[in-house]
Image: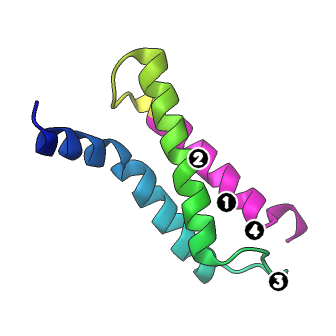
Amino acid sequence: MGPWDAFNHLLNFVTPAAAMAVLLGLSGRIFRSKTPVALSWWARVAIVFAVGVAVLAVGLVVWGRDGKMLTYAALVLACATCQWVLVRGWRA
């Protein structure tokens, strides 16, 4: 596998986490809570992206392959929980 192929595989591996992070970051701006948030939207996107990549990596290690639906379900749950904590959803 050449370097471009490796880069393409890595890019395809992190794309679901990036999509979740951007969608949650943008939806956080649409569905605002009444309490002010401590972090800017791009900082929340970066944190949610890091959590998403970590979940995908754990899924890859545990099951030995990428693309398991259980890993994607864990990605959605972990990213949504992270976003809820970052916007202090319990105060709304």
Q: CA distance from mark 2 to mark 3?
A: 25 Å
The answer to whether 38 is drawn above or below residue 24 in the figure is: below
Residue under label 3, please give it. 34
Q: CA distance from mark 1 to mark 2?
A: 10 Å
Left/right of residue 92 with respect to residue 59 in the rendered view: right
Majority SS type along the magenta span: helix
* Location of residue 59 in the rendering, given as x and y in whole percent from the top left corner: 47, 26
Color style of the picture: rainbow
Q: Nearer the viewer, mark 3 or mark 4?
A: 4
The answer to whether 59 is drawn above or below residue 35 in the figure is: above
Q: Is residue 78 magenta?
A: yes
Residue drawn at 43 percent across, 16 percent down: 63
What SS does tag 2 mark? helix
Quick one: 81 or 42, which is closer to the camera? 42
Label 1: how many residues lie within 10 Å, few (<14), some (14-19) or many (20+)? many
Instruction: Name the kind of residue labelled 1 in the image.
Output: Gln
